[in-house]
Amino acid sequence: MKQTDLFLKTKKQALKDDTSLNSQLLYRAGYIDKTMAGAYALLPLGLQLHNNICNIIRKEINLLNAQELKLNILTPKENWVKTDRWDNFDALFRFKSSYGSSFALGATHEEIITPLAKDFIKSYKDLPFALYQIQTKLRDEARPKGGMLRLREFTMKDLYSFHENRQDLDKYYEKVKKAYLKIFKQLKLKVYAVEASGETFSNLSHEFLTPLEIGEDEILVCEKDETHFCKKSDHGEIQTCPVCKSNIKKIKVAELAHIFKLETKFSKAFDVNYLDKQGKQNLVYMGCYGIGISRIIGILAEKFADDKGLSFPNSVAPFSIHLVPLYTKEAKVNKKIQDQILKIYDKLVKSNISVLYDNREVSNSIKLVESDLIGIPYRIVISEKTLENNSFEFKERNKKTAKIIPLKNFNEKLIK
Amino acid sequence: MKQTDLFLKTKKQALKDDTSLNSQLLYRAGYIDKTMAGAYALLPLGLQLHNNICNIIRKEINLLNAQELKLNILTPKENWVKTDRWDNFDALFRFKSSYGSSFALGATHEEIITPLAKDFIKSYKDLPFALYQIQTKLRDEARPKGGMLRLREFTMKDLYSFHENRQDLDKYYEKVKKAYLKIFKQLKLKVYAVEASGETFSNLSHEFLTPLEIGEDEILVCEKDETHFCKKSDHGEIQTCPVCKSNIKKIKVAELAHIFKLETKFSKAFDVNYLDKQGKQNLVYMGCYGIGISRIIGILAEKFADDKGLSFPNSVAPFSIHLVPLYTKEAKVNKKIQDQILKIYDKLVKSNISVLYDNREVSNSIKLVESDLIGIPYRIVISEKTLENNSFEFKERNKKTAKIIPLKNFNEKLIK
């Protein structure tokens, strides 16, 4: 895409009343706009980043034989009353229509998917199955903070599974865990899957946590081997590893995802039974599995940044390559440089590699500074100097130095 | 896809408290579930249909040099106060957070996109541009009705354009009109683009209306030539065409889309100016262009139906082909029939044609009745009888009779 065709303006001024590095960078680089505290709009660059993350998640979740659907954001009060959460879910947005009915906005969707699934379950033959959505969630947060890390409006992938019994739920739960690890690997996020004290839901759940300085949680980990000991820091303080006696280190972490064995909590509330082989009625076992997509945007921005700006992994970046021609001060455009850039541009487009071509008539320093700010993983620069040597400059955003590569060696395989 | 892998159960019972043909059929065929009056969940079949419609729209809108973004559903009160719509937009859901702030749910997004665009506009060089989203809208409807035709929660494509002056807005407006006609052609919906009396917004707008018995509006059209006369019936009653004196016919119609020349209404409210070539400040001209995606689902369901069920155009149907093996009463599965079906299935999958293979162990009549109900545009049946003649039965959902085609003539080009 040509940069003049992209709705993008980087900003010099900071975002008002917002102290987080991630939202400041995303705002200044043109990924987001702030609608209000806790609600950011995704601009075209931000939406592309968001969709790339969604597609990585979607691919792995589809492999779990889960099927995508779309539930409602507007949900009726009675469903929440049934589970006792109308009055007890703090972050639930509750309000009344002008015409009398009371609604909650979907903060999570157990109250909607459970009665929906009920209609599809008669006997053991209908189980197991799993359904998910990638949907906007709304929560009445007391203090939205951390930029994109604690939002009033955010995208979540929420998966729900339905089983005959505890054993089958356990099996699926482990599969989801593995799929999550694969997802976070592709997102280039180190992750700890830590047992959580699931106060809100059930007796067993895991949080997927990634090291982050501004993270809201802390974990305790064995310095020598994480498999020895890794717990949330509220599990009581300990000094040495119970397995190898090594020191325990504290790590600040942010939550990426949370999974729960709901067991029969919701099937009980909505009376969801199935007929087993013996003709007996049993409650259905459920699991639910969330991934916070908007906060992942914030975490990636916060984590993959330096003093020059953002630096996204290629798996999610809105573009893979930034093509930047540099011209001498006199010439606004040098035809030779432009021709070479366009040759490479065409080749990349034909190879289906997403590329942003900075065709703007602005100074070289503005091009380079903004390129670093936006954080596209690879940059190709062509200037008079590189052309003298029949070469181009190739720079990875997260490396200090560039390579000089002969033009004849240009190959779209440069991009990993 | 194999039907046993699809989250799909057709229903015999009707939807309670719902009298519309479209929602009844979509519910019974397993496309939707009803969350409450005015809010339906999209099940996997329904989501696929929805996404296919979105992609047709997205493709045409991208050709208008418009860029996709995603605004917030949660919007701050002050934006609506600025345009005087906090108190005057009847269908606006308004409520208060537990922590004091007042919000509206996005019923339309002029109040959000205008201040967002303001930041990007300094001079005439920044104009024109266009932004759109495919987003959930929420409206406090007094009486949701007509099934999917009047909803409290629905998907809308909303496009906003920003211009230097009226002339440039007019030009873009005409381009959008043409794009819309192309979209509705692909959706197989006959459409009238009729001048509307844009009470809510501006002095000029067009509604895109399609003939539908349960439609809420009525248009008057010259019997001989629609270009002679075509107006909404509230434009005063007339009996004969002012051009050719032919009779005027009344047609019941439903709204598919609505476009508006907003002119400077919103740029005035949010003080959105640009510097022209002469260095003078001018207000920006705006247009906005909506398409009601959820109601299109309802309209397609209502329109392309017969006494057996749904019948979607191939351009939007969740699958193109329904592969149905019929077995004799004795054999639950006939290996020869199954082998032939699987051969065709593989070939279609390899050709990237979306196909649903009814691999369930149910009676032949259930397969055929449910296939008609779901409304996949093409059906291929293989039975002992067809195999005797080395052939298969090929039936278009909207035709009365089937063709018998030799197996050796099977070709994915059968599907238009």
Image: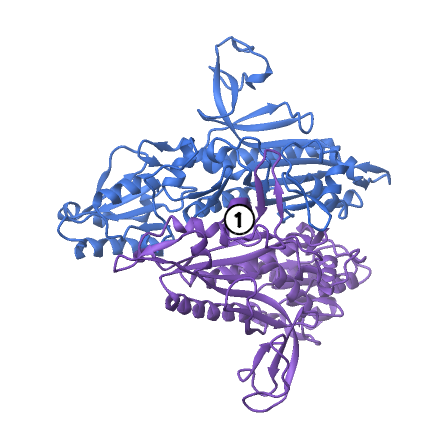
Chain colours: A blue, B purple
Quadrant position of the C terminus of chain B in the picture? bottom right
Examine the rendered structure and indicate whether residue A223 appears above or below residue A359: above
| Chain of the residue on which disc 1 is drawn | B
B163 on left or right of B105: left
| Mark 1: few/some/many CA within 10 Å (<14, 14-19, 20+) | some
Camera-side residue: A2 or A7? Answer: A7
Q: Picture coordinates of residue A20 (x, y %)?
A: 43, 31
Q: Picture coordinates of residue A231 (x, y %)?
A: 56, 19
Camera-side residue: B40 or B358? Answer: B40
Residue farthest along the right direction in this orientation: A279
Examine the rendered structure and indicate whether residue A170 appears above or below residue A395: above
Examine the rendered structure and indicate whether residue A202 appears above or below residue B383: above
Q: Picture coordinates of residue A368 (x, y %)?
A: 26, 42
Query: Is residue B402 among what the camera can see?
Result: yes
Q: Picture coordinates of residue A76 (x, y %)?
A: 71, 45
B158 on left or right of A87: left
Examine the rendered structure and indicate whether residue A24 appears above or below residue B228: above
At label 1, the amino acid type is: Val
Q: Quadrant of residue A58?
A: top right
At x 31% / y 58%, what residue is drawn? B124
Quadrant position of the N terminus of chain B in the picture? bottom right
| Residue for badge 1 | B81
At x 61% / y 41%, what residue is drawn? A64
